[in-house]
Image: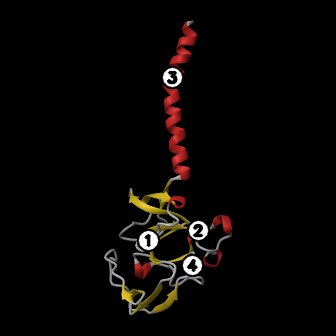
Amino acid sequence: MTDRKKKAAAILSFFTPALIVIAVVFILFRVLFGLCLVPTASMEPTLPKKSLSFMVRTPLLVHSLERGDIVVFQPSLENSDAVVDDRPTLVKRIVGLAGDTVEIKDGMTYVNGQEYQEPWLAETPEKLNFGPYQVEDGKIFVLGDNRNHSVDSRYWIDPYVDVSSVLGKIVYVIK
C-alpha cells in the first residue's frame, strides 16, 4: 500500500465511527427524543422561560400520557392566531385525560369531583371559576404551573388539546 492510500485509510478509519455516531444521534433526536425551548413563563417555576428541556417524542407515549405530565404540543387552529405552519409550540401540564371532568372553583382544581393536589404551583391561584369541562376521547386538558400568568385550556376557544398534536413529554430540564 502506498503512503497516500495508508493516509486515506487512516483518515477514513478515524472519521467513520464519528460519522456513525453523528448519524445515530441525529436519527434518535428526529425520531425518539427532542429539545424544546420553553417559550413563555407559564410553567414557572418548574420550567423557567427560555429554559431548554429534553423531551421524549410522542410515538412512544401515545398510550402512556398521564395526569401531571408536562407536554409539548401545537395548539389547535382555533386557539392560535397564526397559520398552520407558524403555530407556536406550547408547554403545559396535563390535568385532565379523556373521560375526566375538570372544574376550577375559587381557584382550586378538581378532577372528577376530587381536589387535585398541585405541589408544583408557586403561588395560590386567583379565586376564579371555570368549567366544568368534560374531556373528550382523544383529548387532554392542560394548565400552566404559573397559573395566574398562563393562557391555557381555561381560556381557549377549544379548551382541549388533541393527543395527536402532542409532540412529546418533557423528561428533563437542562436550563
Q: How many marks?
A: 4
Residue 71 percent across, percent down from the top left: 48, 67
Q: Residues within 10 Å of mark 2 (few under 14, many from 20)?
A: some
Residue identifier under label 3: 13
> Label 4 to label 3, Cα distance in Å?
53 Å
Q: Residues within 10 Å of mark 3 (few under 14, many from 20)?
A: few
- 175 with respect to 28 (left or right): left
Q: Nearer the viewer, residue 66 or 150?
A: 66
- The mark nearer the N terminus, 4 or 3, is 3
Tell me, for residue 137, which label it has, or none: 4
Name the front one of labels 4 and 3. Answer: 4
Which element carries disc 1, helix, strand or loop? loop
Residue identifier under label 2: 165
Rendered view: 21 above or below 139: above
Query: Residue placed at 53% from the left, 65% from the top?
Result: 62
Which amino acid lies under the numbered mark 1 shown in the image of this protein? Glu
> Label 3 to label 2, Cα distance in Å?
43 Å
- The mark nearer the N terminus, 1 or 3, is 3
